[in-house]
Image (cartoon, helix red, strand yellow):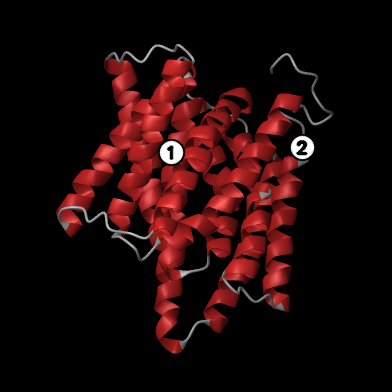
Amino acid sequence: MSGDTATKTGFSTQDILGFATVSLMWGSTWLVIKDQIGFLPIGWTVTIRFTVAALGMFLLARFRGEDLSLNRQRFLLALAVGFLQFCGNFQLVYRAEHYVTSGLVAVMYALLMLPNAILARIFLGARITKRFMAGTSVAAIGIALLMIQEYRHAPPSGAMNVALGVGFAIAGTLCASGANVLQASSIGRKQAVVPLIAWSMLLGAVIDAVMAMSLYGAPVLSAPPRFWAGVAWLAIMGSVVTFPVYFNLIRSIGAGRAAYSNAVVPIVAMALSTFFEGYRWTALAAVGAVVTLSGVLIALSGRKG
């Protein structure tokens, strides 16, 4: 717990501000990610994003006067986080958004707290409460309703695309969860946040580049200004600004509870999807969204453990 005054649920003012920052920033990035698809091969799009983000993070670390040296332990941790978070997670997220709406992918990521809590229980011995399990179960029902909505409105040839999008999103969530739990481990907590993220982004971008080269060949950088504007938003606001806040939340309150910040992300993402992607709300979609967010809030309502 930080020195800030805690609320009745055990969250400090700093925690609450962190939730707000992460939720609003990442709520907007889902739509921008969707807009990035189609200009360049996905592998190179992810590589470019995190190459720019890594440069920004290194500059931030230098500005703060932080130590950027690497020993063997730091390198291995940065490599693991880079592979899981900035390669596996985002390679899969971008592919998921190729097949389904950005709002649905964001709602699915609202359940990130479940694998976070399970992995934290297995590897870190963290406690899982009955309230948490009840809320997560309710949220899972909401997710199921949203998936049914997608299947019902997909053309006959598009049902498989929905399944692919959902599968990619689930796999991406698991990768993100693995990186989150590494951050919450005793080794992770010993590392300065910004330098660790900088190295993780750089190493993740290197892995992304190797994969992109093997799948698509040499990069083609010809893209319209809107693509590069999206890269700038995702790299700076969605990465350099937001990831240090999120990783500090993980260390402050644990991986499971840090994922509660995703409770607001779907609201922002689906609202933007409605205006910019033409997402059409039906009764089933509305009920699914409400049930999902209600489940997340049920889990959130317990005291900080």
Q: Is residue 14 above or below residue 132?
A: above
Which residue position holds label 1?
178
Spot occupied by residue 96 in the image (x, y as percentages of width and height)? 43, 62
* Farthest bottom residue in view: 156
Quarter of the figure with residue 95: bottom left
Q: Is residue 77 above or below residue 301?
A: above
Q: Residue at x 60, y 40 (%)?
A: 259
Quarter of the figure with residue 203: top left
Q: Are marks 1 and 2 in contact (CB under 8 Å)?
A: no
| Other residues around mark 2 within 10 Å, as few (<14) / some (14–19) / many (≥20) | some
Q: Residue at x 40, y 47 (%)?
A: 89
* Farthest front residue in view: 225
Placement of the C terminus among the 4 image quadrants: top right
Looking at the image, can residue 148 be seen?
yes
232 and 29: which is toward the camera: 232
44 and 187: which is toward the camera: 44
Secondary structure under the numbered disc 1 in the rendered image: helix
In the rendered structure, which disc, 1 or 2, sits on the residue that comes first in sequence?
A: 1
Spot occupied by residue 271 in the image (x, y as percentages of width and height)? 67, 62
| Other residues around mark 1 within 10 Å, as few (<14) / some (14–19) / many (≥20) | many
Query: The disc labelled 2 sits on which kind of residue?
Result: Gly
* Farthest right residue in view: 8
Q: Answer with left or right where residue 106 lies relative to residue 260.
A: left
Q: Is residue 62 above or below residue 26?
A: above
Placement of the N terminus among the 4 image quadrants: top right
Secondary structure under the numbered disc 2 in the rendered image: loop
Spot occupied by residue 181 in the image (x, y as percentages of width and height)? 48, 32
Query: The disc labelled 1 sits on which kind of residue?
Result: Gly
Distance, label 1 to label 2, CA atoms, is: 24 Å
Q: Residue at x 41, y 45 (%)?
A: 175
Which residue position holds label 2?
302
Spot occupied by residue 56 in the image (x, y as percentages of width and height)? 42, 31
